[in-house]
Image (cartoon, rainbow, N blue to C red):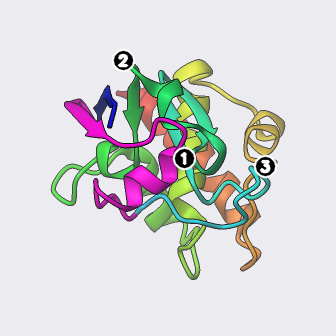
Amino acid sequence: MPSVRFRLNGVETTVDADPDRSLLDILRGPLRITSAHFGCGANECGACNVMVDGHAVASCDTPLWSVSDKDITTVEGLGTAELPHPLQTAFITEQALQCGYCIPGILISAAALLKKNPHPSDGEVRAALDRNLCRCGSHNRIVKAVLRAAAEMAAT
């Protein structure tokens, strides 16, 4: 079985698996990362989004081989309970989640946006999150939370 090496949440990781398996399969299976959720399996919903080298990607249709020697960040790598990422704090403050199924993918998409554009407009936030589906209808609070996090990050 071939090995694929990458950095997962800052930790060097090697996986012995079929390199054509999806990254989502590997994260949820042998690596036991539970934040990336299976939603549609077709890169249509964003529930499985992770950051690969700073870009939000759907892990459900990303083959393992394509992340070799790359940096992968999941929600577990954004912050901790003791030191949450500003996005995580803002989502709680703005009550920007309901069931929570979509939130890890949305947090990742938002974090990738803020890396690229630390001062996004409302429209830029909406565009960046357009591929993330929230069936609970929390989109307006989600956008407000991302804008709050951006403002708080700019102030520090």
Q: What element carries label 2?
A: loop
At mark 1, the secondary structure is loop
The residue under the point 72% across, 80% down is 136
**Marks 1 and 2 in Cβ contact (< 8 Å):** no
- To which residue does mark 2 refer? 69
The N terminus lies in quadrant? top left
Percent coordinates x, y for residue 71 in the rendering: 38, 25
Q: Residue 22 carries which label?
A: 1
Classify 16 as above or below 12: below
Judged left or right of residue 124, residue 14 is: left
Looking at the picture, how far across and down is residue 45, in whole percent? Answer: 74, 58
Q: Is residue 22 magenta?
A: yes
Measured Cα–Cα span from mark 1 to mark 3: 19 Å
Can you tell which of label 1 and label 2 is closer to the viewer? 1
Q: Earlier in the sequence, mark 1 or mark 3?
A: 1
Helix, strand or loop for disc 3: loop
Distance from label 1 to label 2 (Cα)? 16 Å
Give the magenta-colored segment's residue range.
10-34
For the point 56% across and 82% down, the residue is: 99
- The amino acid pointed to by label 1 is Ser
Badge 2 amino acid: Asp
N-terminal of the pair, mark 3 or mark 2, is: 2
Quadrant of the image occupied by residue 20: top right
Is 117 above or below relative to 36? Answer: above
Q: What residue type is labelled 3?
A: Arg
Tell which of 114 and 145 is nearer to you.
Answer: 114
The disc at residue 131 is 3
Question: Is residue 149 shown in magenta?
Answer: no
Task: Tell me where residue 82 appears, x and y as whole percent.
Answer: 15, 56
Sequence-wise first label, 1 or 2: 1
Q: Distance between the residues labelled 3 and 2?
A: 26 Å
